[in-house]
Amino acid sequence: MKNIWTIYRTDIKRMVTNWPAAIIIGGLIVLPSLYAWFNIVASWDPYSNTKGIQIAVVNQDAGTTLIDQPINVGKEIVAALKENHDLGWTFVDQEEALHGVKHGSYYASIIIPQDMSARIGTILTNNPEKAIILYVVNEKINAIAPKITDKGASTIIQQVSSNFVETANGTIFKIFHAIGLEIEHELPSILKARDLILKLDQHFPELNETVKLALVDVEKAYKIITDAKDSLPVVQDVAQKGKQLSSKVANVMEHGESGLISIAPLVKQDMQSIADIADSVHETAVALQAAEEDPSVGVALLNRTEAKLSIASSIVKRLIAWHDKLETLLPAGLVQRKLERLHAIEDRFAAQTALVQSLRSALEAGEGAAKDLLGHLDASAVETASITNTLVDQFDTELIPAIESKLQETAHNANQVTEVLNTGLQDLPDVAKLLQDASKAAPVATQELHNIQHELPSLEQKVHRIAGDIRDLESKGNIQEVIDLLLHDVQKESQFFAQPVELKEQKLYPIPNYGSAMTPFYTILSLWVGALLLVSLLSVDVHEEGIRYKNHEVYAGRYLTFLTCALLQTLICTLGDLYVLHTYAVDKLWFVLFGLYSSAIFMLIVYSLVSVFGNVGKAIAIVMLVLQVAGSGGTFPIQMLPQFFQRLYPFLPFSYSISLIREATGGILWDIVYRDLWMLLIFAGLALLLGLVLKSPINRGSAELVKKAKDSRIIH
């Protein structure tokens, strides 16, 4: 042990007293920090400067009309992009756009074709066509720029879709509303025609008896016939209006069914959002149960959970309102069961909100999260997710088929009314003829009454058939239900279907900029580079005249020298990250300590390789550097890398050192820290095994090879 410290003290003394050596070693200590700092500054916040990414926009849209309303989607896109400063939108013609993309003046171009609005307008035809926007991107200019321009193109598509849904639905709902008002206005006439037909059917036996009596009393019969003759124009007018309105009702139901098809995925998406939020609450409860959270972190987590519960409650209320409207249209019990489940979900979300507030109060008071409250919160969240998943499963299998069936049934009934009234209108001329004949002069009244008496049975059958059809139609549905459905608020419904769900982002362990997020990778990388620089310029062997040290004494004594330099490199790098570059870190002290720990392990690994294998060891350390840069998940998530690197990932020291620094940067989870510390300790143990146990036999075995290599006077 004495010789080990002697070697170390001698090395330190020589570094301090020999000014050329001190300058060189000082440069070696500072150089890795510069490597890290330049890379961190270069990648500090590149996505805040995306306005420099030039994208050419070409608008060729000629516009169209949608239900007598002029629309020009291209102009709307251009107007929106002029207010959007996230990217460098440039408005040019097609020739300039394509030329600029080819020659690199623009990274991409977006061409809005001439038939853009026309294609969107086909939604109301039997053959709708999707609108097409031509997106041209030059991928050879830069690897990242196409990803940014892709996002810009996707944003345009999303904006067009949202605006069109709101406009189209608003127009359609206005038409439905107008038809509903017209039906409501003509409802008294429709009901009057219905009452007349039913009354006529009810009193036909009396009419037959009257005709019989008329044979005895012509004057009395003549008066009855005159009254019936005067009523015929009213019946014909009411029947004609009823036929027109019934046709409109059938047409409305057909549009209602197509509207339902477009609405259904949005309602289902709301249900799925509730399930996702319930799962998120469950994950929050599990996270708080599994680890002792820092109170501030726990409070922040509970705040985000409360916000999600508020959103979920709003969605549930919207779904309850939607189901309340459906309850009057669908069979008894079907929607009621869904409403009971939705009210149960609403109650659970309210209870969960109260539990979250209680837990947050406890954490803020320093009392810690009560296990029983966490258990109740977890159980409630799991039950909520289960109920919601059941609703999602039943939405397509029960609710949608029932609504479609009801709409089809109503449309069918409306068609039946039309047929019934058509039949009645066809028969009315016969009735008019009979009454006209009956009103002839008194001398022939008796004969005409005989004729009427003869025709009455067939007329009674026709009226009875029409009345039966009306009763059958009323037993299946109420026209007031259709009117109520058509008279909903136009603006609210169009806005709802344009954007039924709002995304509210909650960031876990937020990091304010990209440079801070990349600091763990570049810092760890610079520590390994620093170790390589040290073994490249400083000797791992001790040559003292007249003194012979043992291999393990040389190994340990000289390692202390390298370790001192490595720790100084780390202090300068980590403290410079925090106080020169002002990179973000939640736990600054642990950021520095984890860096020192990683640096000691890296130095031991690299030093052991060079101490045992010489120049070959330096090559091995460089190969390890290359593999770790690519396969440690420092830049891209490891799941995105090829299978080779995914399998190599657990065996790389970088993987655990980067993870340690990330914990200090974003917020520490100690179970992850303990795992990383132990894994790095295993790497240190393997390096010590290599240096202390295998150094002597390997050095002896390779001595002749090393001698011949040096004899070449090329390799030192």
Image (tube, rainbow, N blue to C red):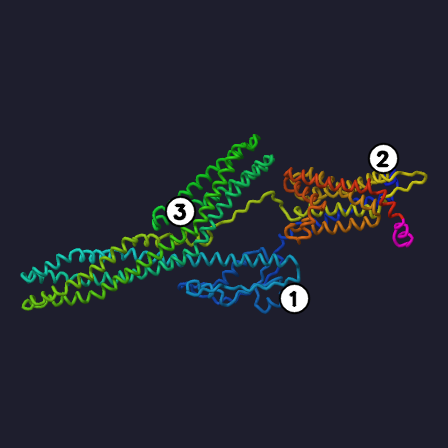
Quadrant of the rendering where the N terminus is positioned: top right
Question: Can you tell which of label 1 and label 2 is closer to the viewer?
Answer: 2
Question: Can you tell which of label 3 and label 2 is closer to the viewer?
Answer: 2
Question: Which residue occupies 35% across, 53% down?
Answer: 485
Q: Is residue 713 magenta?
A: yes
322 or 304, nearer to the observer: 322
In this figure, which residue is indicated by the disc labeled 1? Answer: 103
Q: Mark 1 to mark 2: distance in Å?
A: 65 Å
**Amino acid residing under circle 1:** His
In this figure, which residue is indicated by the disc labeled 2? Answer: 5
User: In the shown orientation, is residue 632 left or right of residue 8?
Assistant: left
Q: Mark 3 to mark 2: distance in Å?
A: 80 Å
Q: Which quadrant of the structure image shows residue 147?
A: bottom right
463 or 512, nearer to the observer: 463
The magenta stretch spans which residues? 704-716
Question: Can you tell which of label 3 and label 1 is closer to the viewer?
Answer: 3
Residue 504 percent location from the top left of the image = 52, 47
Q: Is residue 379 above or below residue 110?
A: above
In this figure, which residue is indicated by the disc labeled 3? Answer: 321
Name which of mark 1 and mark 2 comes first in the sequence. 2
Mark 3 is surrounded, within 10 Å at the Cα level, by few (under 14), some (14 to 19) or many (20 or more) other residues, namely: few
